[in-house]
């Protein structure tokens, strides 16, 4: 069951997102199904007059915006009905059998049922690779808008609007209605500048600040390297100038980009005054040489150069 859920196609076809949106043309392809009157009526407190599409059945993520930018995703209704499917029923039966065989002496945690699976996203933002730099080295996504969408997890742990890897500039997350039992309603790592306002739950109530979190840029994925501030060797108008600028519309308590507060991983390491352009040059040299970058080792090299400070 887990292989089918998490694997890669064709063996793990169910592990893929329903939609991978690389540009605006790809977005238009999913905006073809008119919203049904019964669906519109079930969300009477929301204005769905412009809604264009009701989501199809999905197992993993609904959509990944996998792009360098200039994409708008708007007016979609995304409902997580997978937990009520025959697949979820079979999945839970297998999980139950596995958990029955686990004893107290087994160090592994019990396997979660489908409803509680983490890392499923309604909308995930992932910057695409540019000049040998991918999201794990802080690749940038620019000018993306996620607006007027409805995301109803129906009690599952589906994450709402989420980004954990890469950097994001001029991102707008506006007037979305989101209900989820997961720990991430709106969570963005590495938001350099943007706008987050007018987001609410599916009853039309404004989301409290605890449901919206902007966290430090994360480097290296599972290496869990976090950047609290930047040092730039390029001018402010350079396309790869990194800085935590203002986020319009956000409650200050949701802005955790320059602190350790929102990071609970005990293996996390933190750095200040990081020169991302010079760090990416180290990463690029490894890639060009045919090596797999060791992000932690390269960060230590950056520290030795005087272009990052551990905290």
Image: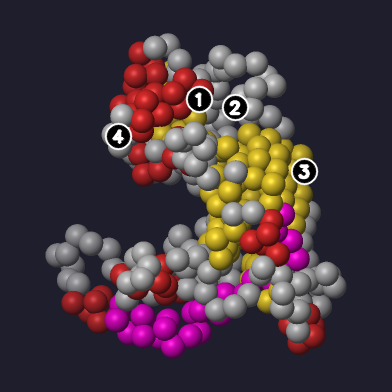
Name the one closer to the observer, 236 or 263: 236
Circle number at residue 249:
3
Can you tell which of label 4 and label 3 is closer to the viewer?
4
Circle number at residue 276:
1
Residue at position x 54%, y 32% from top? 259
- Please report whichever mark, 1 or 4, sits nearer to the chain's N-terminal start: 1
Give x and y (percent) for residue 291: 29, 34
Instruction: Please tell me in which quadrant of the rendered image residue 237 appears.
Output: top right
- Please report whichever mark, 2 or 4, sits nearer to the chain's N-terminal start: 2
Q: Which residue sits furthest top?
A: 306
Name the one closer to the observer, 240 or 168: 240
| Residue on which disc 2 sits | 240
Give x and y (percent) for residue 239: 64, 27
Name the one closer to the observer, 203 or 224: 224
Residue at position x 25%, y 75% from top? 99
Q: Which residues fall within the magenta stretch?
A: 72-95
* Label 2 element class: loop
Whole-number angstrom distance, CA of label 1 to CA of label 4: 21 Å
Give x and y (percent) for residue 305: 39, 12
Crowdedness of circle 3 by 10 Å Cα count: few (<14), some, many (20+)?
A: some
Crowdedness of circle 1 by 10 Å Cα count: few (<14), some, many (20+)?
A: many
Tag 4 near tag 3, CB within 8 Å: no
Residue at position x 44%, y 23% from top? 281
């Amino acid at each position: 069951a887990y292989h089918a859920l998490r694997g890669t196609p064709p063996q793990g076809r169910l592990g893929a997102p329903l939609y991978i949106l690389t540009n605006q043309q790809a977005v238009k392809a999913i905006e073809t199904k008119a919203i049904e009157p019964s669906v519109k009526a079930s969300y009477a407190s929301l204005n769905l007059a412009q809604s264009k599409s009701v989501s199809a059945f999905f197992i993993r993520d609904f959509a990944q915006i996998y792009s360098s930018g200039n994409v708008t995703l708007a007016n979609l209704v995304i409902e997580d009905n997978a937990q009520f499917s025959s697949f979820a029923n079979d999945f839970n039966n297998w999980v139950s059998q596995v958990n029955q065989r686990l004893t107290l002496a087994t160090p592994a945690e019990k396997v979660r049922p489908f409803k509680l699976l983490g890392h499923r996203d309604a909308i995930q933002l992932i910057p695409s690779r540019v000049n040998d730099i991918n999201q794990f080295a802080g690749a940038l996504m620019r000018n993306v808008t996620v607006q007027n969408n409805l995301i109803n997890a129906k009690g599952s742990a589906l994450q709402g609007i989420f980004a954990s890897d890469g950097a994001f500039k001029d991102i707008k997350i506006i007037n979305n209605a989101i209900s989820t039992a997961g720990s991430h309603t709106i969570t963005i790592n590495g938001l350099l500048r943007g706008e987050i306002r007018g987001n609410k739950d599916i009853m039309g109530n404004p989301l409290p600040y605890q449901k919206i979190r902007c966290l430090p840029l994360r480097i290296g994925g599972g290496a869990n390297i976090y950047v609290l501030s930047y040092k730039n060797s390029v001018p402010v108008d350079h396309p790869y100038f990194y800085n935590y600028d203002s986020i319009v519309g956000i409650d200050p308590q949701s802005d955790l980009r320059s602190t350790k507060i929102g990071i609970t991983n005990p293996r996390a390491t933190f750095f200040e005054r990081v020169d991302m352009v010079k760090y990416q040059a180290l990463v690029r040299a490894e890639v060009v040489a045919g090596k797999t970058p060791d992000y932690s080792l390269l960060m230590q090299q950056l520290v030795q150069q005087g272009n990052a400070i551990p905290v």
